Image (cartoon, grey):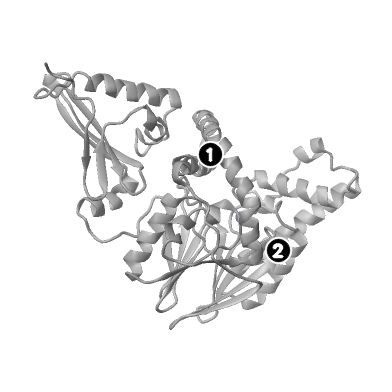
Amino acid sequence: MTHPVTTVAIRTERLIHRTVTLDDTGDVALNWNVDDPPLSHEEAIGRVQWMQANHAANAPGRLVHLCLAIVHRETGRIIGWCGLDQRDASKARHVLSVAGRALGAVRSNTMNQSPTTESNHFRLHQLAEGVFAAIATNGGSAICNAGIIDLGGQVLVYDTFLTPQAASDLRQAIASLFGPLPCIVINSHYHNDHIWGNQVFAAEAPIIASRRTRALIATEGAEEFKWYSANSAQRLEALRAQYQAADEEQRQELLLWMGEYGGVVEALPHLRVCLPTITFDDRLEIHGARYTAELVAYEGGHTGHDTVLYLPQAGILFMSDLLFVGFHPYLADGDPAQLLKALRAVSPLNANDIVPGHGPVGTSGDLALMIDYVEECLETARTLVEAGHASEAELDQLRVPDKYAHWQLPRFYRTNIRFMCSQLRPASG
Ligand SMILES: [Zn+2]
């Protein structure tokens, strides 16, 4: 008696080639056409069932159809497909389809080369000798930017991204650039997109944050974790449905959120929030053979406490979410007046390069624009409240000023003005 050959798993050092099950539906939807938009949930279920039905026709010595996902072992992500289709012997063909964006990883995986700096989640930009900004890519699950700095003898990591998947690519990039050097991790503030990659570094690196940020990770951050655990899968489904009907511009923004919720859904089964292990109050200097890193924490700017990192020898400033470039900032977890204070405090540094929490590497011009934005938002909110025009319906009608019309995440504009109005209105209002 022969049994159908329905499951196959081939393991190499860094890849697994295996048949998929309905547990993989989410990843199948995202990666069925590796360089195209995702399938709907129903379509993905259909594809999995189609493969399973074909595999049921296989028997030892008689291979009719075999469809294997190429899975990146470390991240668990499907990065392509390979297989054999002989359902119609006259049209028998081999299939190999690997995401273009994943080819770098595949090449180094299959040839077992040294770690790579390539990632689907970020692009590295070298700013000075030993100093790199890791700028998040749209659709990946890094979401925020990070910094890696070879201080001389040790590598400093400024923020660890939203997901362990993205953080482990960052760790690979560090190994590839600098070899086996000890790391020190900095968390700029409590928001999940800056700290949920901590677990990738936690076993081997101290994690440093301001005392207040650590407390916020333990409180607000725990709430955030609960919310994402309860809602991410549903959010992802809704976003996928919207994606089908969206135009190209909307798709760019949807892709960002799909990267966020898709990354979280993938990470949740093994995600742990790792608290900082070393804290400081307002200032800390870390001295290496090459660079000194100056950490300064500001009260109440973007969140309750936000730490910037300055490299005086290189004139490079990492600002995390105290600065957004080409994106509307998110101001509703902080205090805009305090944010202005922080922005004005770092302006005289005249840094050559300023790395924001979101968006490309900027300059002091971007810092000045951010100051304008916060001042103008405050002025708009004040005018609306004083004129009695700050009702929900009126706020819904607000238009983004032309000066910022090309910035991404325009919905944050209304969120910011609404937040400022609520701060200005009497508590009873
Ligand atoms: Zn933030």
- Dot 2 crowding, Cα within 10 Å, few <14, some 14–19, many 20+: many
Q: Amino acid at mark 2?
A: Ile
Q: Is residue 325 above or below residue 22?
A: below
First along the sequence among labels 2 and 1: 1
Q: How far apart are labels 2 and 1 at the CA level?
A: 28 Å
Asked whether residue 212 appears in the rendered view, the answer is: yes
Mark 2 lies on residue:
371
**Drawn side of residue 427 relative to residue 103, left or right:** right
Say few, some or many: other residues with alpha carbon within 10 Å of mark 1 (under 14 / 14 to 19 / 20 or more). many
Left or right: where does residue 223 sit relative to residue 86?
right
Q: Quadrant of residue 54?
A: top left
Quick check: 306 left or right of 269? right
Residue 281 image offset from top left, x and y in percent: 66, 72
Estimate the x, y position of residue 287 in percent, counting from the top left.
Answer: 50, 81
Asked whether the beta carbons under mark 2 and mark 1 sit within 8 Å of each other, the answer is: no
Q: Which mark is residue 254?
A: 1
